[in-house]
Amino acid sequence: MAQNKIDTELYLWEVFVQDKFGEPFTHCGSVHASDSEMALQNARDAYSRRNEAKTIWIVKSSEIISTTPSDEGPFFEPSNDKIYRHPQFYTIPKSVKDKLF
Amino acid sequence: MFEKKIEENLFQLLVQIADDKLILGHRLSEWCGHAPILEEDIALANIALDNIGQANSLYQIAVKLENKNRSEDELAFFRDEREFRNIQIVELPKGDFAFTIVRQFLYDNFSFLLFQKFCDSNFIELSDVSKKIVKEISYNLRHSKEWILRLGIGTEESKFNTQKAIDKIWEFTNEMFEFGNVENFLIEKNIIPNLDTIKTDWELSVKKIFDNTNLQIPNISYFASGGRNGFHTEYLGYLLAEMQIVARSNPNVKW
Amino acid sequence: MINEELELQKFEQKIANGEKIEPKDWMPEKYRKQLIRMIAQHAHSEIVGMLPEGNWITRAPSLRRKMVLLAKVQDEGGHGLYLYSAAETLGADRKDLIEALLNGKMKYSNIFNYPTLSWADIGIIGWLVDGAAIVNQTMLAKCSYGPYSRAMIRICKEENFHKRQGYENVSVLAQGNAKQKQMVQDALNRWWWQTLMMFGPHDENSTNTVDLMRWKIKLETNDSLRQRFINLTIPQAYAIGLTIPDNDLKYNEKTQNWEIGKINFDELYNVINGNGPCNRIRIAERKKSYEEGNWVRIAAENYALKNKNNYGTK
């Protein structure tokens, strides 16, 4: 049987959707498209068939830069002991806390 | 609300446009599962859905106006070829992707201009539904326009296929600017727009995109005509036979 | 080697804790391969599955049914897209996956190798085939691989309408005239056993299950999912006066399970091996669409290369 070769499936784009104005954008998947305009259109048809989006961002998948699992320790763990960044670190007199805070 | 004569003409008009949308939606739905790329499968299905949905809304207004207890499904499934009032361009077989895109581009442009004007119609039901429809068409037009650019500029082959499609379709474009016998009467009453102005705008926007892509408008002297009066190509009969087979083989039941 | 073992331990611990594995996390090669195989097979099923139902869009007997069916088949395209998207996070390329489908190296759900022969088939597929898919997918939504699980959550939400429209369609026919009733019973007779086989072979013959379950790619066995589906579906069939085509069917009061007759798995293996009624037709149709679409995709890619503003560089 002859092999079926596909010439191209175009480029891969990541899709981020904002479901309400003012909300953050959430990654929801990817689409294939030749260019940014078609990627936007395809993202709209694929990820907002039920009115799920107010705004869509697309970005070429190859342009996404991510930390790697081996970064996990050095990148994120040091912030674990910076407990003074959290409000719970601080004590407020009870009389003030109940009424004024 | 309107006098009888207006209502009758208005009914005719609504059925004409709804028939366009239904038949075009049918042709588009034939792509489902067969598009050049998965994303386009989804896009074409979406446009087909828009068109069939628009047909449905327009039939609903029409049957209300007619007031004879006919349903929108009776209009769609129980009329014969000679009773269908769509223009011929929408009934031509779907062809290759270039053919489908060229037809969409030409029809979307027309439909967009028409429904923009319908938003100002004196007939409230029509202007209300048009405000929703015009948004859908605006998106459909963006889709077909962007594809014309890609096909027109992409490769020699895609340009050739697109030009071939334009050459085949062009004789069917003039019919868009005919409304059978209903027009003059309804134009006078500000219910529908004057189609001459739409034609001028249509020519401008089509030409602009074709110029950008070096696609040529063919110089021809024959133009098809008659769809609005039930005169069709031979393709419509086969389309209706397929579309109506289930409904007609078991009439008067719920589905 | 020691490092590898340590990573594996951490990986398995993570799964045991109910945490999700994400694309860039360390994972055993076998986990990656099994997932790609499973997700791609699932994606292929969605896009091949568009064909038997798509057949009836142009013949749907009312405008409402036409729109519903078109929206449903479109959703299936969307679901295929989400799933390919999940497979691509594992480093697979959609082009390779689709090539593998067209060359017969990868499978899709067997159920789509049967023809849709009447309008009632559309209702039955929505009710049974999508119903079975939902049972399976609800489990997969809890699987250990993040992108697959998230795609499944989205798909399950959307599929609920598929099943409901199917059941509505079936119940209208079941309450219709004699011809409609006969049409829907005939469709049920043709699809019932095929749907039960969608869950795969019995547990004792399912070679992959042990590994898949240890890594929570799968959380339940074929037989337990099948039983859940049967228990859900049989009362729904009875409620609208349909007959399940199984003379041995009986309710077991003690286990509260419906017990079915013997499934003819020879047929399943026969169809898996390429000898179902539609195997060749389905793949030929997909191939044709891809071949005919070649020039369109090349044109779009070329346009992007010519038009740098559109950011079309590889």
Image (spheres, rainbow, N blue to C red):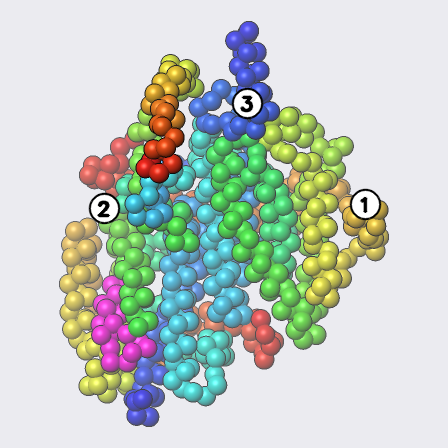
Judged left or right of residue C174, residue A75 is: left
User: Which residue: 69% across, 52% down?
Assistant: C232
Q: Are marks 3 and 1 in contact (CB under 8 Å)?
A: no
Residue, far bottom: B4
- Disc 3: which residue: C14
Residue type (three-letter) at the residue carrying disc 2:
Ile
The residue closer to the viewer here, B199 or A12, is: A12
User: Which residue: 33% across, 36% down?
Assistant: A101
Residue type (three-letter) at the residue carrying disc 1:
Thr
Residue type (three-letter) at the residue carrying disc 3:
Lys
The residue closer to the viewer here, C78 or A22, is: A22
Q: Quadrant of residue B155?
A: top left
Image quarter where the C terminus of chain C lies is top left
Gap in Å between the C-alphas at discs 1 and 2? Answer: 67 Å
Mark on residue C255?
1
User: Which residue: 83% across, 50% down?
Assistant: C253
Judged left or right of residue C39, residue B175 is: left
- Disc 2: which residue: B153
Main SS, magenta region, reads: helix
Q: Quadrant of residue B114?
A: bottom left
Label 3 element class:
helix
Residue B234 visible, this angle: yes
Q: Nearer the viewer, mark 1 or mark 2?
A: 1
> Magenta residues?
B107-127
Can you give x and y, in whole percent of width and height, for residue A17 in the image? 35, 43
